[in-house]
Image: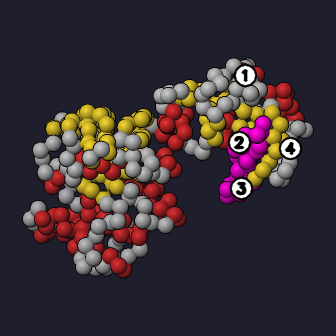
């Protein structure tokens, strides 16, 4: 592994910000530290950078324990949430700053700065000051400045948080391409699931200072290993008891269930495509319809429980108050630690994907 955290612990008084954190990152990978606010993500990032000292455990970069190495000597580039650009320096001077601190040759500095200006798409803006740039442009400058000294590792703390939604999406796509192009190992902190899924090769989920799960976005979404991950990832309904639903009568009665929108199908009773599945379906009433751009999000009341499902705009129109057949394919059942998937037993032998 290129970067490792081994048995890292960190307390702030009575607050445990990191509880025996262990993970490794392969060279060239883009990793997201994902979790709710206050979960310990930024503390972990700062310990990697040497800006915060762990109480115990080792930070290892390229096989070397760097616990006692100062931040400036760890070979790390850091992009802060609020850009942290020098207001009275031009784009050129901001990018050149770290190289000048290293007392590099003037020509080498110029060549490297212009290479990065071109890389981040800010040609012709070298003489502008930060207040003459948009939020997206400032973040590109911050990215270029962090890359200028050719760090081994790039760390980004909520890099898109201060940018509006449209530009944020564009920057996410841009950043992923840039990271691949440069080939640098990168770790970024976010509380935005969409951001993590779109940008990262792997996601590390942190909750209350504890590492819950590490895996690819698909693995994290489809195979959550803990009850927290099952509830945190995606848009889910958390139910105290699901055993009364058709096909799920044998579920434990005291365990919570997680039902995601893609686990639910709502169809009209005269739908020929789903006609054979009516015996496995409940009756539900549409209580809310939300337009989500490319689809409708339906909220349905089923047995007094609210479930959500997504409906294609190409299907027949539906309205609030309409009665629908509601089929639940599967659920996650939670115990104290794990999340286990249970399929509707009435659908045994039915190829749902073919419908």
Image height check: is 309 above or below 241? below
- Give coordinates of residue 104: x percent, y percent: 10, 64
Q: Is residue 181 visible?
A: no
Work out whether residue 319 or residue 122 is closer to the camera in this orientation and state it: 319
From the viewer's perspective, tell me whether residue 145 is left or right of residue 271: left
Mark 4 closeness class: few <14, some 14–19, many ≥20 residues within 10 Å: some
- Tell me whether the residue at label 3 lies in contact with that at label 2, contact meaning CB atoms closer than 8 angstroms: no
**Any part of residue 299 in sight:** yes
Residue 310, magenta (yes or no): yes
Mark 3 or mark 2, which has the lower sequence index? 3
| Residue with the mark numbered 4 | 323
Nearer to me, 66 or 287? 287
Q: CA distance from mark 2 to mark 1?
A: 18 Å
Of mark 2 and mark 1, the one earlier in the sequence is 1
Mark 3 or 4 closer to N-term?
3
Q: Which numbered dot is residue 307?
A: 2
- Helix, strand or loop for disc 1: loop
Q: Disc 1 designates what residue? A: 249
Between disc 4 and disc 1, whose residue precedes? Answer: 1
Q: CA distance from mark 4 to mark 1?
A: 23 Å
Q: Is 134 left or right of 87, judged from the image as shown?
A: right
- Tell me the magenta residue range: 289-312
To which quarter of the image does residue 268 belong? Answer: top right
């Amino acid at each position: 592994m290129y970067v490792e955290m081994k048995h890292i612990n960190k307390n702030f008084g009575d607050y445990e910000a990191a509880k025996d954190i262990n993970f490794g990152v392969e060279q060239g990978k883009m990793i997201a530290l994902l979790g709710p606010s206050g979960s310990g993500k930024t503390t972990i990032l700062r310990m990697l950078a040497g800006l915060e000292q762990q109480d115990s455990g080792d930070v290892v970069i390229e096989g070397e324990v760097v616990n006692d190495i100062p931040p400036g000597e760890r070979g790390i580039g850091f992009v802060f949430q609020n850009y942290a650009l020098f207001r009275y320096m031009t784009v050129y001077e901001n990018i050149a700053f770290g190289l000048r601190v290293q007392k590099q040759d003037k020509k080498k500095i110029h060549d490297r700065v212009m290479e990065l200006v071109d890389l981040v798409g800010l040609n012709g803006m070298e003489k502008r000051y930060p207040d003459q740039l948009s939020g997206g442009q400032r973040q590109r400058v911050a990215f270029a400045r962090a890359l200028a000294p050719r760090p081994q590792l790039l760390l980004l703390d909520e890099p898109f948080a201060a940018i509006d939604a449209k530009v944020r999406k564009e920057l996410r796509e841009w950043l992923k391409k840039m990271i691949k192009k440069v080939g640098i190992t990168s770790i970024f902190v976010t509380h935005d699931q969409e951001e993590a899924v779109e940008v990262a090769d792997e996601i590390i989920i942190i909750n209350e200072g504890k590492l819950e799960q590490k895996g690819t976005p698909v693995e994290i979404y489809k195979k959550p290993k803990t009850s927290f991950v099952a509830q945190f990832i995606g848009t889910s309904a958390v139910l105290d008891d699901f055993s009364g639903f058709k096909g799920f009568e044998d579920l434990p009665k005291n365990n919570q269930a997680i039902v995601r929108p893609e686990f639910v199908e709502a169809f009209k009773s005269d739908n020929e495509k789903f006609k054979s599945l009516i015996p496995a379906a409940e009756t539900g009433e549409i209580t809310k319809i939300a337009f989500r751009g490319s689809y409708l999000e339906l909220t349905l009341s089923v047995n007094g429980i609210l479930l959500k499902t997504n409906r294609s705009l190409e299907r027949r129109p539906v309205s609030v108050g309409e009665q629908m057949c509601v089929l639940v394919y599967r659920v996650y059942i939670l115990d104290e630690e794990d999340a286990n998937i249970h399929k509707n037993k009435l659908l045994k032998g039915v190829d749902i994907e073919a419908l």
